[in-house]
Amino acid sequence: MIKIITIIGARPQIIKAAAISRTIHNKFSSSIHEFILHTGQHYDDNMSKFFFDELNIPKPDFNLNVGSSVHGQQIANMISGIEQILIDQPPHAVILYGDTNSTLAGALAASRLYIPVIHIEAGLRSYNKTMPEEINRIVCDHSSTLLFSPTLTGIQNLIKEGFNPETKPPFNIDNPKIVHCGDVMYDNSMYYATQAGKNSQIIDVLGLTTNRFLLVTVHRDNNTDNPERLTAIFYAINKIAQEEDLDVVIPMHPRTSGLLEKQVPPALYNSLMNNIRIRIIHPVSYFDMINLEKQSLMILTDSGGVQKEAYFFKKPCIIIRQETEWKEIIDNNAGIVTDANEEKIINAYKTFSQNKKRISFPPVFGDGHASKFICQEIVNLFSNN
Ligand code: UD1
Ligand code: UDP
């Protein structure tokens, strides 16, 4: 039996982990035993527990409860907690997802103990090292033995950094294997789309009309922590809602809720609060979120995961960042990168709403079975290595 410790901490990692946990449970339970270690990076029920319940993810075997703090402190607490668990109960490998501080801590703790790292969502690059996530993902990729990239762009990025796509076993940190596998988030979106449609009441609860509302998420630190940027984003949203007579739904990340009133001018804040078209709500469940995505007219976001889900559900996406790791979305005209620029955001809205671009959504994120492929690769590697 291959013993794996999956290390997660932030909302998107919990959601991604659901796909692999489900596949292990349904198809690989005789060969893989998964233990889940939650760092506690996200801890509000609507950022953590509710996803375990809704997506049937086994309860974490370990929870470090690190909570929020400045990055150095948070990462240090994670590393020492993870290290102790890996010493006490050494697995054959750890699974890490994405690019958060929990990913970085897991990569450092495991690699120092010579425990192989499996990185799911490897190879993504923004080529912007002011993003904490860029450093996290580079360190994690370069500490990994098995790297699963959801896209071909990710594989090309890894090759540019010296990874060899033709390595032969035995694989290890100095002879890693890179694999193009599709996206576990796509697996989830396909798996849960119908169920979400049946179980989620959010469209009725909010009184929304299909294809008549904009879905917005904003949480990236360089947007929330910068008053000019956050103000430009919310001016644009307010203006679109007013001028286009369009509902706007904003399930707000706790980071943004904590900062909005402080960062934007009082007149804008009051206007947002008094605009009946704008619904600022708490973070929603995964089923509610994918239902909102499916029924929306368009999505405006700085989230990595929400950008991709927009594409999965064939919705145009305004990307309020300076760049994106998901180049395929831009290549197919399905997304426009506007940065936090009011004019560019409004122009992107017009471009999409007036159908000025020929958008396409070819299947660049796999076939919806990335998790099965990943589990099989894990079995192949750790049974033979
Ligand atoms: C983290 C990730 C980011 C990812 C995002 C997903 C890093 C460096 N960043 O950003 O890559 O896109 O998660 O959502 O790892 N907070 C709460 N309750 C919670 C969690 C957070 O109130 O349950 C608030 C706290 O004020 C905290 C702030 O949100 O200080 C930021 O949380 P943190 O986990 O540090 O980073 P995120 O912005 O969530
Ligand atoms: N999500 C959710 N509820 C929300 C907002 C997002 O379930 O209120 C889901 C979303 O569908 C996607 C994931 O959270 O699967 C994206 O996480 P987030 O935007 O926090 O992080 P990122 O992907 O940018 O790292």
Image (cartoon, rainbow, N blue to C red):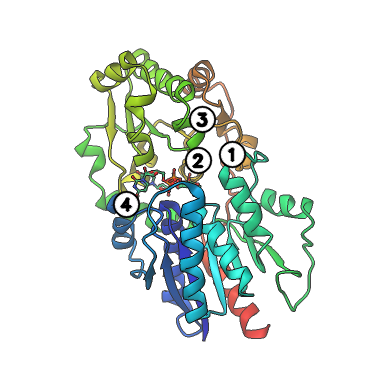
Across and down, in percent, residue 225 comes to 46, 31
Q: Nearer the viewer, residue 357 or 41?
A: 41
Tell whether 257 sits left or right of 153.
left
Name the image quarter holding the C terminus.
bottom right
Q: Residue at x 61, y 42 (%)?
A: 325
Residue assigned mark 1: 329
Q: Nearer the viewer, mark 1 or mark 3?
A: 3
Q: Residue at x 67, y 84 (%)?
A: 384
The type of residue carrying mark 2 is Gln
Across and down, in percent, residue 322 comes to 59, 30
Q: Please indicate, yes or no, whether residue 41 appears anywhere in the rendered image.
A: yes
The type of residue carrying mark 1 is Ile
On the image, which quarter does residue 253 sit in? top left
Against 147, is 238 above or below? above
On the image, which quarter does residue 38 sit in? bottom left
Q: Nearer the viewer, residue 135 or 167?
A: 135
- In terms of sequence position, does the residue under pointer 2 or pointer 3 come before the other? 2
Spatial distance from mark 4 to mark 3, Cα to Cα? 27 Å
Spatial distance from mark 1 to mark 2, Cα to Cα? 8 Å
CB at disc 2 and ligand 2 closer than 8 Å? yes
Q: Which mark is residue 196?
A: 4
Tell whether 180 sits left or right of 278.
right
The type of residue carrying mark 3 is Ile
CB at disc 4 and ligand 2 closer than 8 Å? no
Q: Nearer the viewer, mark 1 or mark 2?
A: 2
